[in-house]
Image: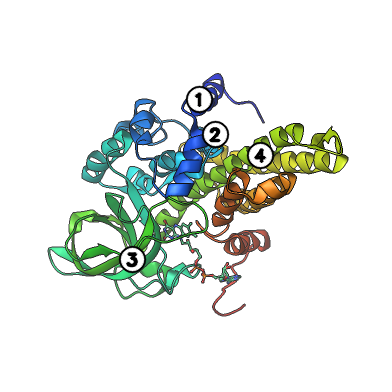
Amino acid sequence: MDFNLTDEQKMLIETLRTMGERENFRDLAKKVDATGEFPYHLMEKYAELGLLGMTLSEENGGGGQPILNAVLAVEELAKFSPMIAAPVFESNVGPVRVIDRFGSQKQKSEIIPKVCKGESSVSVCMTEPEAGSDLTALTTKAVDAGGHYLLNGTKTFITGGGHASHYMVYCRLGDTPGYKGIGGLLVENGTPGFSFGKQELFMGLRAMPSCDLIFEDVKVPKENLVIKQGEFVNLMSTFDVERCGNSAMCLGTAAGALEAAKSYAQERHAFGRPICEFQDIQFKIVDMAMKLDAARLLVYRAACGAGRGFPSVYEAAMGKCFANEMAVEVATSAMQIFGGYGYSAEFPVERMARDALAWRVAGGTVQMLRITMASMLFGRRFDQRKGK
Ligand SMILES: Cc1cc2nc3c(=O)[nH]c(=O)nc-3n(C[C@H](O)[C@H](O)[C@H](O)COP(=O)(O)OP(=O)(O)OC[C@H]3O[C@@H](n4cnc5c(N)ncnc54)[C@H](O)[C@@H]3O)c2cc1C
């Protein structure tokens, strides 16, 4: 077991850290949150640095690096803001990986080089108004209409909705009930019959494009089929990589909150002393650091286990569940250390707490992750529908 990062990984972290300081990403994070304007201008810079698609397969035009490198990059950028890390997240651990691994040669060569240049992006479209945690109840359906599929249904809370060029739509491809009837179709933005709902107004992750997707008799070419009916497990194993990215967002947010709280505790005085001299503040900081490091070990374990492929379902679920809850605890502790200023939008920690809350739901709720882990610990499946 080796807990050390390679020289290249240390250099990656240092490059992103110095870029963030030089380019004043702290101010950018505040501006993005206040205006709701996504920092699209970063795409070009990230593409130049080779951050977009750095972990996609080399033969498809990606960087061929291990998943851990993307986790480290996302974590470092998310210290400033998840919105600043989002393009690295999407292009490395997002649904473009489904295409990288399972797509046709045509899909790969059309999409992946553009994703690496920041010219295209892919959104994952699972959730429906009546199917969230209960994903296999989804009803969006693609009917074989001879030369094409005819797609109908509605997706909700889709990150990148309206902005992404492509959508990996989880849908029913036949009448087989449950997960066995689900596959994945790639739908291009601009296809007739495909429209978007209004932008969601979330408490955090401000600026992240998110909306409903509406499919009304959308003609999807047959060649856009990525995952056949019955191969749902392929969609989900790719999604476990996304879960490592979600966890990395939490590591970054928590690390940003810890740094801010440490600095503040040394500057702020009460009773004639810097508040870091009070033991309660020291213990809070230590607990925050301890929880963050524990989450890091779980998340890095899952990412290391994935290599350039997929993580273990158990390790990815455990890393995400722990990191999701840790980020909320650390960010709210940071708010407490800031006192009244922690509740003010002038300082970053209230934004970090708002952002942190999202990850406990996005990518699968912490309850559903616990259900996954429970079934592995007990070695049996607990059917949530039948209750036994
Ligand atoms: C910021 C954000 C980004 C998102 N991005 C995307 C995206 O890009 N693509 C996408 O497809 N979706 C996305 N989602 C949707 C997300 O995946 C769902 O919100 C999530 O899976 C939960 O589904 P739901 O909201 O329908 O909640 P529900 O499934 O209705 O659950 C409600 C509550 O009940 C609990 N619950 C449900 N069943 C059980 C059970 N059996 N045991 C115990 N508790 C249970 C849940 O954990 C939850 O607390 C995003 C959500 C957010 C907040």
Name the kind of residue labelled 2 in the image. Answer: Glu
* Residue 122 showing in the rendered view: yes
Q: Is residue 180 left or right of residue 374?
A: left
Which corner quadrant holds the N terminus? top right
Residue drawn 33% across the image and 49% down it: 122
Name the kind of residue labelled 1 in the image. Answer: Leu
Disc 2 or disc 1, which is closer to the eye? 2
Residue matched to label 1:
12
Residue matched to label 4:
297
10 Å neighbourhood of mark 2: few (<14), some, or many (≥20)?
Answer: many
10 Å neighbourhood of mark 3: few (<14), some, or many (≥20)?
Answer: many
- Marks 1 and 4, the one that precedes in the sequence: 1
Res 171 label: 3
Cα separation between marks 2 and 4: 16 Å
Residue matched to label 2:
76
Q: Which residue lies furthest to the bottom in this view?
A: 386
Disc 2 or disc 4, which is closer to the eye? 2
Q: Quadrant of residue 124?
A: bottom left
Circle 3 SS class: strand
- Marks 2 and 3, the one that precedes in the sequence: 2
Report x, y in % for residue 359. Answer: 55, 54
Q: Is residue 199 above or below residue 79?
A: below
Report x, y in % for residue 256. Answer: 61, 38
- The reply to whether callout 2 and callout 1 are in contact (CB within 8 Å) is yes
Name the kind of residue labelled 4 in the image. Answer: Leu
Name the kind of residue labelled 3 in the image. Answer: Cys
Q: In this view, does 95 lie to the left or right of 264?
A: left
10 Å neighbourhood of mark 1: few (<14), some, or many (≥20)?
Answer: some
Report x, y in % for residue 320. Answer: 59, 51
- The reply to whether callout 2 and callout 4 are in contact (CB within 8 Å) is no
